[in-house]
Image: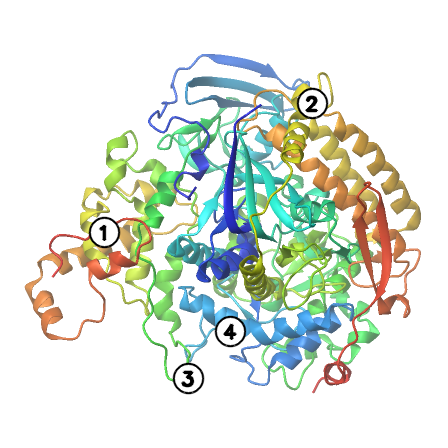
Amino acid sequence: MPDHETHDFDVVIIGAGGAGLRAAIETKKRGLRTALVCKSLLGKAHTVMAEGGAAAAMGNVWPEDNWQVHFRDTMRGGKLLNNWRMAQLHAQESPERIYELERWGALFDRTSDGLILQRDFGGHRYARLAHVGDRTGLEMIRTLQQQAVALGIDVFMECKVLRLLKDADGRASAAVGYWRPSGDFVTFNAKAFVVATGGIGKSWLFTTNSWECTGDGDAIAAWAGADMLDMEFVQFHPTCMVWPMTARGILVTEGVRGDGGVLRNAEGRRFMFDYIPPMFAAETAATEEEADRWYDDHTNNRRPPDLLPRDEVARSINSEVKSGRGSPHGGVFLDIATRRSPEYIRRRLPSMYHQFKELAGLDITTEPMEVAPFQHYMMGGIRVEADSGSTTVPGLFAAGEAAAGMHGANRLGGNSLSDLLVFGRRAGMAASDFAEGRVGTPAVEESEVDEICRAALKPFGNDGGESPYDVHRDLQETMQQLVGLIRTETELVRGLENLGKLDERAEKVSVTGTPAYNPGWNLATDLPAMLTVSRLVTQAAIERRESRGGQTRDDYPKADPELGKINLIQRIRADGTYELERVPLPPMPAELAALLEEEPK
Amino acid sequence: MSPDTAPGASPVNQEVSPQVPPQAPRDAHQGSSPDDGPSVTLSVWRGDPGGGAFVDYAMPAIEGEVVLDVVHRIQAGLAPDLACRWNCKAGKCGSCSAEINGEPRLMCMTRMDQLPQGEPVVVAPMRTFPVIRDLVTDVSFNYTMARQLPPFAPGPAEPDGIYRMMQIDVERGQEFRKCIECFMCQDVCHVIRDHEENKASYAGPRMFIRYMELESHPLDTNDRRELVRQRMGLGLCNITKCCTEVCPEQIHITDNAIIPLKERVVDASYDPVAWLGRKILRRKKRSATEAAADAPAFSAPTHDDR
């Protein structure tokens, strides 16, 4: 058995992307002993890949913008399934969180009068995304990282958390994990925990997500008995690279369309005009001429359909490809070359230019890109109380992509980065309150810790078993083919059957070598989380027999008004079985509901 | 545990910096039937602080793939325990730095078909940092240096609470903030490559662009020039531009950061007019001693701070 070390903290934050870093800054500033635990090196979390920007109604470009409009856009984009209180807090607090980054050293692009510049994105009525070219996530994570370092926060890098343990009273009390460099085990005892582990994309074959996005946080919370919410809502980003095959899934920022790029099919037609849904007809341009005028005059023209919410655009692309009007490698064309000057494209979209040049040998200033929808974001996740991020497990908090509710059935582009800041801070505040109020030293059963470590090491003793890579590959095939963008009951049920078999196979995987920096073993310890999360997604997708946002059912192509009034809640019982419950949406105050009814000016 | 020790928290001997043997013996592994169609061979350094060797892995080529794709295929088949760092696989996170055919590059942005064909592609860990295992190195040196930096300290905002900065004034800093912390500039820097003894007193190109970024930040009030001269070893850099050449973000490290920083440091130390000006006029920037006091990690004040 490798060595085992133990640490005591007030608050332990799991995950060091935008939400985790922001939470840690808050708890540290409160004077609490704070540990930030992350699977990779500091500054490499998936937030670093965010491109387009952070949505905040600062009104720097369009003074007409305000939190009410942002709230309305977010709710409508989420097909009204969002937790209204989270959408409200997000719309109200995002501007201050962006200004805070500036006070910590961030250098956003500027307007001509020296304010933070804001860019257009899908589903947002006004140009609203604070950004730095197309590398906004890098700017954000670096700023937060540098602030965390300046505060002297204890960071445990390359450390994976396997499980959360509760004390006799059911409060989260310890996190057990291992150091990836050495394979040695480590236990963090703490009074409060914040899960900020991000996405779940690595269960799909093609995803924009990095290797870390294995749903660890979702799984450890679910295993600890926390309620999970909206797990059926998975976002497929409409524009990802399709070729070369090995680059398939790499993100192409929505900023391409925000900055004037348009989608075309093989015939060169701007097909998005054929797919404007009734819900957005009143605020979407009807002709190419109106759409083109909108970039300079938002007041007298309506938004191009290329900038409909992501779920609409993804479905439309899929349908063009299925109708035989796709591009040579199975996508559609994204064209900015014929619409903007090469200088403009290189200045506004430097990493897109670089990415296509290097990986596909394609110059986006002269040729169209080929794009298609692939897994990108998880709207669902751990159910949290809106103001505090507290989960249904006392002492456990969640924020960022791992938490659910803010984005409803579909997230608008740009709302994620500001979500991380707003709710990272709030989870940090609430976790601090909880830790300060908690009496006694957190204590867990030693035998439970030992059991977790033994289970993690089991693959070393499974002689002659499969490689974890084979099980992972089959899981990805299953989710890609059976639980993808377009779903049917038959395929989902088959997916569930496959997951059962994969569970059994994952039990028996075997790995070679030692625990020290062993990717095969690391993957073997990621598999249980991926399988649990995949099961939750599939079960919820079967239960919601309608099409709405990130859930598109070919066998139920319409939205069902009755299902529009409920969220799906799932939890794992102590005996390991799963339960699913329909709960009504929290009632919205009349003044907020009135905002949703307003027709755009 | 803190950022400077975390990556090497394993019982890795921090003193040992095993050199990758240039003529190491080679083991050969064959992938699945490389006979049909074009094949690729990756010669990967495998080992730990105790030593290691290059191992050849041959497999069928796949159109358009990058070096990291081949490493992943090796992990999925021939060697599941082959250690390498990676995250985004899109050139944005700077995790998968390695020395490919002797040149520091990101594995995720190096296409196999743009490397010399018909010969093994040699992949070794970055040499300037101690090996943890295979292609993974202990880069904690960089995090230690980052902790010694007196942080950004903005002056007061305008009366409406807003900071106004013009695009032209933020562009210099934005160039340096493109840095993805791949640490290849540090890897290739002569001052610390093969000179472990210099690391204690040399921040390296990655940190010099950070110092220059703050130096040129329109809002910052900390003066770090004496610190960077006396404690961070700016004078040791002899401007060979190796760092600039390997930067995957094409940051002009030498021309836009190190040389201007050297000039400003000289101004701070030896220019009597500037010295007198600071004595007489109200200082805009705080002194090195004051600035150093902001750093969470120990950084000694400089002796001739005026």
- Do marks 2 and 4 share a chain? yes
- Do marks 3 and 2 share a chain? no
The quadrant in which residue A103 appears is bottom left
- Do marks 1 and 4 share a chain? no
Q: Residue at x 33, y 52 (%)?
A: B252
Q: Earlier in the sequence, mark 3 or mark 1?
A: 3
Badge 1: chain ID? B
Badge 2: chain ID? A
Give the residue type that dot 4 points to.
Answer: Glu
Q: What kind of colouring is applied to the model shown?
A: rainbow
Q: CA distance from mark 2 to mark 4?
A: 50 Å
Give the residue type that dot 2 points to.
Answer: Ser
Q: Quadrant of the N terminus of chain A?
A: top right
Q: CA distance from mark 3 to mark 2?
A: 62 Å
Disc 1, SS: helix
- Do marks 2 and 1 share a chain? no
Label 1 Cα crowd, 10 Å radius (few <14 / some 14-19 / many 20+): many
**Pointers 4 and 3 in contact (C-beta within 8 Å):** no
Q: Which mark is residue B228?
A: 1
